[in-house]
Image (cartoon, rainbow, N blue to C red):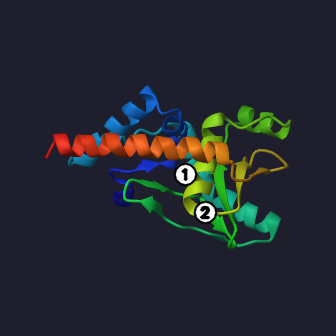
Amino acid sequence: MKCRKGKLTGSNAQAIQAQGDGLKSYVVQVMSNYYASVRDDTYTNSDMDRGTELEPLARAEYSRVNKVKVKEVGFIEMNKYVGVSPDGLVGKDGGIEIKCHSNLIYFKLLLGGEIDKKYWWQVQMNLLVSGRKWWDYVGFSPNFKKKLVIIRFYPDQCAFDKLLKGFEMGIKQIESIKKQLK
């Protein structure tokens, strides 16, 4: 996606907030794709393919169960270096992050398991960048009678502070690379 080019995005929120070597590596990856004529990070796997295929079904099921309309949006920019690609916005206050898990991971969610921390950070970055009041993490699998597991999250100021510090550090690194290659 052209609008994501050269930007820190939500799918890497965990690395951003950690402000360490993971952030440095991520910035180098972002900038390599910024300067390259063809992106080389088009990796997919069976989990990603399943998500691409099932996400529209998950969105429709979420809308039906909650009796709400989910608006699809492209990319929300916080600034010229930071943005997120939400899976949907709900009303004026909410949003959703959809994950179409394998049977085992989905079943663990059904049993009350916690979501992977990287997704929690992604949700927090979506909340921060969008300014929304709540965000639903939507686990989906058409292979079970109960197709959805919905976990609602609210803004966490501590997480926001870490993300903002990570944005600041990441932006400085991006600007340094741009200056070096000018």
Q: CA distance from mark 1 to mark 2?
A: 26 Å
Where residue 58 appears, x then y in whole percent? Answer: 69, 57
Rate crowding at label 1 as few (under 14), some (14 to 19) or many (20 or more) other CA atoms within 10 Å: few
Q: Position of residue 25 (x, y in %)?
A: 38, 31
Visible residue check, residue 130: yes
What residue is rendered at 37% in x and 59% in y? 80
- Judged left or right of residue 174, residue 23 is right
Residue holding disc 1 = 52
In the drawing, does residue 67 fall left or right of residue 42?
right
Number of marks in the image?
A: 2
Left or right: where 124 falls relative to 107? left
Front residue of 156 and 42: 156
Residue 32: % across, % down: 27, 40
Q: Is residue 92 above or below residue 24?
A: below
Q: Amino acid at mark 1?
A: Thr
Mark toward the start of the polypeptide (1 vs 2)? 1
SS class, disc 2: loop
Q: Secondary structure at mark 1?
A: helix
The residue closer to the viewer here, 177 or 51, is: 177
**Most foreground residue, 144 or 108:** 108
Q: Position of residue 97 (x, y in %)?
A: 64, 53
The answer to whether 143 appears left or right of 16 in the picture is right
Residue that sits furthest to the top in the current view: 21
Task: Sort mark 2 into few (<14), some (14-19) or many (20+) by Cα contacts within 10 Å.
Answer: few
Examine the rendered structure and indicate whether residue 44 appears above or below residue 25: below
Report the residue marked by disc 2. 131
Q: Is any part of residue 38 visible from this angle?
A: no
On screen, residue 19 above or below 98: above
Name the disc covering residue 91, or none: none
